[in-house]
Image: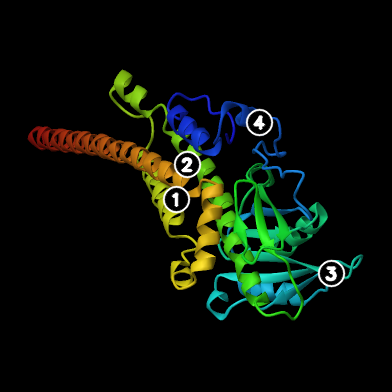
Amino acid sequence: ARGPVTSSFLQPFAMLQAACRCRGTAQQMVQLAARTLPGGKFARHASGSAKKAFKVHALATADMYALPKVRELARSQTRFTVQPLHPELDGSIVRLAVNDPATGFSKDAFVFREGAFVGWGLTESELQDLHSLVRDTELRPYSADLVNQERDFILACDTSEPQSRVDDKFVYLREHIPNAPGQEELLLEKFAVSHAIASSVKLAIWERKLSTIASSMESLPETLSRRGTLSLSQQEVHQRLGDLLVLRHRINLSVDLSDFYWDRANLERLHKRTLVFFDVVARRRIVNDHLTFTSELAELGRVITSEQHSRKLEWYIIWLIAVEVRCIQFHQQLYCQL
């Protein structure tokens, strides 16, 4: 699961989320729980038979990156090199080659406009360098704790099979053969997997944000039942509604590249299989259900605070009328005395 959620209001959401994230038998769950990332996530470990296994890391650090600035900064130094990928993807992603002076080889990294980047075989130092590169292009950056808690990875390895594939443990990539036919397709296969991992870490950020919003409204039903009124102001309720609308928009419309995949069956297969690996579809459905409930609660709060505000205005008007009547009476008495 993604972390302890003790509130009774959030427990159903946390239980469903944990059920989706922890697939398999009880023994498999115990094995997964024994191997966690620093942020508390379950790590998917490879079997001993895999060769050349490496990690594909994904981090979400901001709501959005300014991709033109990412390209500009990458071209101003030698650590990263901007590489072409596909013309249809230029507005959504920047592909970088991470140059390794020690080996003379380069590794691939993909920077997504929606505030996430994915590195193939990058060391922790290289990931930090990449984060430093994109930091100046971030719009509404996340805290360091949130970034580290919600980062994730999948294991990948080369295979002699004719097609790349994803199973419950690995991404199996066709081996890279320089100047051989089909190498452009291999890069797009890496992109398809990266896109799915980026979607997963972004969804994890949104899950955390939804939990924060829901926690701030947790006491609303109990307060209403006990006091008959709400302690939240009309502005606070409107702010919660706005946050929920923005969150729903981002969850359901971010990184929509369905048009790119529809006539590329192999890429669509890899993308969807990676989404299944990270339970993205099930998690998104749960988040949308929870969003619907929380939005209904916020809408109820909006109606109640509007009524409370209307009653206050009515009392203000009554008091103003009373003061005006008293002033008229005073002036009449004063005139009679004169």
Q: In 3D space, how far apart are the residues under numbered discs 1 and 4 (Cα atoms)?
A: 30 Å
Instruction: Name the front one of labels 3 and 1.
Output: 3
Instruction: Name the front one of labels 1 and 4.
Output: 4
Q: Is residue 5 above or below residue 276?
A: above
Identified by mark 1, the residue type is Leu
Where disc 1 sits, the SS reads helix
**Residue tagged 2:** 210
**Residue tagged 4:** 33
Q: In 3D space, how far apart are the residues under numbered discs 4 and 3 (Cα atoms)?
A: 35 Å
Q: Is residue 199 left or right of residue 245?
A: right
Q: Position of residue 221 (x, y in %)?
A: 34, 26
- Residue 174 versus residue 105: which sits nearer the camera? 174
Q: In 3D space, how far apart are the residues under numbered discs 2 and 3 (Cα atoms)?
A: 41 Å
Label 3 CA crowd tier, 10 Å (few <14, some 14–19, many 20+)? few
Where disc 2 sits, the SS reads helix
Q: Is residue 193 left or right of residue 14?
A: right
Instruction: Name the front one of labels 4 and 2.
Output: 4
Q: What residue is drawn where x is 53% and y is 67%?
A: 266
**Residue tagged 3:** 105
Earlier along the polypeptide chain: callout 2 or callout 3?
A: 3
Q: Is residue 21 left or right of residue 160?
A: left
- Residue 290 versus residue 184: which sits nearer the camera? 184
Q: In 3D space, how far apart are the residues under numbered discs 3 and 1 (Cα atoms)?
A: 40 Å
Q: In 3D space, how far apart are the residues under numbered discs 2 and 1 (Cα atoms)?
A: 8 Å
Asked whether disc 1 touches disc 4, contact meaning CB atoms under 8 Å apart, the reply is: no
- Residue 120 versus residue 181: which sits nearer the camera? 181
Q: Position of residue 19 (x, y in %)?
A: 50, 33
Q: What residue is drawn where x is 65% and y is 60%?
A: 117
**Residue tagged 1:** 247
Label 4 CA crowd tier, 10 Å (few <14, some 14–19, many 20+)? some
Say which quarter of the image contains residue 294: top left
Earlier along the polypeptide chain: callout 2 or callout 1?
A: 2
